[in-house]
């Protein structure tokens, strides 16, 4: 099977994950897909193939050199986003894209246009795989899986390329933030790994946010409004005062790059009791800690004003920036850089304004930067992937395997 045939086969599986199910994998379709992949890996002649009850599929391509070479892994996720259906995906290949509008679905008037998506023009003359406008495509992250499997098949067919032991890992439930939770890093047994889960060609990510969630409960005192003078405490107003004490421009809609923020994600309230929820994000660990301290400080201020116990703060760290785990092993970034350059891809380092499975894996002891898989417009009907992007990603994987063994 070719890379494209693989990809088209993989997107025919409905593997949408589900935040509410409470089991792993979160949907049975992911296990169906995992079993299919397991058979494919067996037919490719890989070794140590394991599929555990949670849907984590691991396999080994043994070394073809006697030289001691570190064991490196490649990881991709099998699920697709809960944001849009991934059932009955009906992809189409637009060959030699001419730079004009692509009608995905005439009856639904769904058009993939460079007017809304100017990045399309970077792929003029290439062959794009698009949706029929009714589902997402699933290039996130089945492009990653197809690239890894195809790279492994290529290495098997080309024994003249010397490489060490390569591990591959396919996990469920990345899109609901649970891809790394039950990932058995010890069993995977790699010195480091790469997730193939980024977007545009050249993307290389090894920095993400430090993240915390905060909930503040404000207690009020309700009194008949006609007799409320000097007695009533309206918890909605107290909450509003707290919100207004935070810097008004440190919000997602006013920040980019390495700028952190406080993001108000929820508020429910009445006079007696108001609950306010935030997420706190910053790439820099010190600034992240200071943001949390600012919350504590403001809560103390509210309590000094309205009485002890008026505001109660709950803070929880969610994940951390993987940079601190990557910095001691920067050679794994250098290798990815060199591999990209060797296959004609210009590396483009980007700080993720979010989290990744790789960040969690890095903190579980498996340093794990993220490399492009080549798709664009993830999680919706406008998702597409240039075939040339997937080929480049596959070449990067092959080249990394080769470089690690040559060093
Ligand atoms: Zn993904």
Image: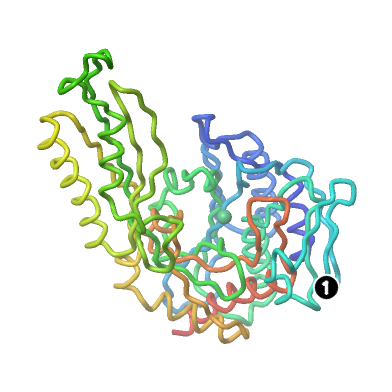
Disc 1 element: loop
Q: Quadrant of the N terminus?
A: bottom right
Quick check: is the Cβ at mark 1 less than 8 Å away from ligand 1? no
User: Residue 116 at x, y = what percent?
Assistant: 70, 63
Residue at 54% in and 80% down = 402
Q: Is residue 233 left or right of residue 57?
A: left
User: Residue 214 at x, y = what percent?
Assistant: 30, 41
Crowd tier of the residue under label 1, counting other residues whose Cα lies within 10 Å: few below 14, some 14–19, many 20 or above: some
User: Residue 246 at x, y = what percent?
Assistant: 28, 51
Q: Is residue 150 left or right of residue 284?
A: right
Depth check: 86 or 48 in front? 86
Relative to 62, does residue 365 appear above or below in the rendering?
Answer: above
Q: Which of the 4 quarters of the picture holds residue 131?
A: bottom right
Q: Which residue is mark 1?
A: 97
Q: Quadrant of ligand 1?
A: bottom right
Q: Which of the 4 quarters of the picture holds residue 82?
A: top right
Residue at 54% in and 47% down = 175
Depth check: 36 or 387 in front? 387
Return the residue found at the far right: 107
Residue at 68% in and 69% down = 390
Q: Is residue 325 left or right of residue 219?
A: right
């Amino acid at each position: 099977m070719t890379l494209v045939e693989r990809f088209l086969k993989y997107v025919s599986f409905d593997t949408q994950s589900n935040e509410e199910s409470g089991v792993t994998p979160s949907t049975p379709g992911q296990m169906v897909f995992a079993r299919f992949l397991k058979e494919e890996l067996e037919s490719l002649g890989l070794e140590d193939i394991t599929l555990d009850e949670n849907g984590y599929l691991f396999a080994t391509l043994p070394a073809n050199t006697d030289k001691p070479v570190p064991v490196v892994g490649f990881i991709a996720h099998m699920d697709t986003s809960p944001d849009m259906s991934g059932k009955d995906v009906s992809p189409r290949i637009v060959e030699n894209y001419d730079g004009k509008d692509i009608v995905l679905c005439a009856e639904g008037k769904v058009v993939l246009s460079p007017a809304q998506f100017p990045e399309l023009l970077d792929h003029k003359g290439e062959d794009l795989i698009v949706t029929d406008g009714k589902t997402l495509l699933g290039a996130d992250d089945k492009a990653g899986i197809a690239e890894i499997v195809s790279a492994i098949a290529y290495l098997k067919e080309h024994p003249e390329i010397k490489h060490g032991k390569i591990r591959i890992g396919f996990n469920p439930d990345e899109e609901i933030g649970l891809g790394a939770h039950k990932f058995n890093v010890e069993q995977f047994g790699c010195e480091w790994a790469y997730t193939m889960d980024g977007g545009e060609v050249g993307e290389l990510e090894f920095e993400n946010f430090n993240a915390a969630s905060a909930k503040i409960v404000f207690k009020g005192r309700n009194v008949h409004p006609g007799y409320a003078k000097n007695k009533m405490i309206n918890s909605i107003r107290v909450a509003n005062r707290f919100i207004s004490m935070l810097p008004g421009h440190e919000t997602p809609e006013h920040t980019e790059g390495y700028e952190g923020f406080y993001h108000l994600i929820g508020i429910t309230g009445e006079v007696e009791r108001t609950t306010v929820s935030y997420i706190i994000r910053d790439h820099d660990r010190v600034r992240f800690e200071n943001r949390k301290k600012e919350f504590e400080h403001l809560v103390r201020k509210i309590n000094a004003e309205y009485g002890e116990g008026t505001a109660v703060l709950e803070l929880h760290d969610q994940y951390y920036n993987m940079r601190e785990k990557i910095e001691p092993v920067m050679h794994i970034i250098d290798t990815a850089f060199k591999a990209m350059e060797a296959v004609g891809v210009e590396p483009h380092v980007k700080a993720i304004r979010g989290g990744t499975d790789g960040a969690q894996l890095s903190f579980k002891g498996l340093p794990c930067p993220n490399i492009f898989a080549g798709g664009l417009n993830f999680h919706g009907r406008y998702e597409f992937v240039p075939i040339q992007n997937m080929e480049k990603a596959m070449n990067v994987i092959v080249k990394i395997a080769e470089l690690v063994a040559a060093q």
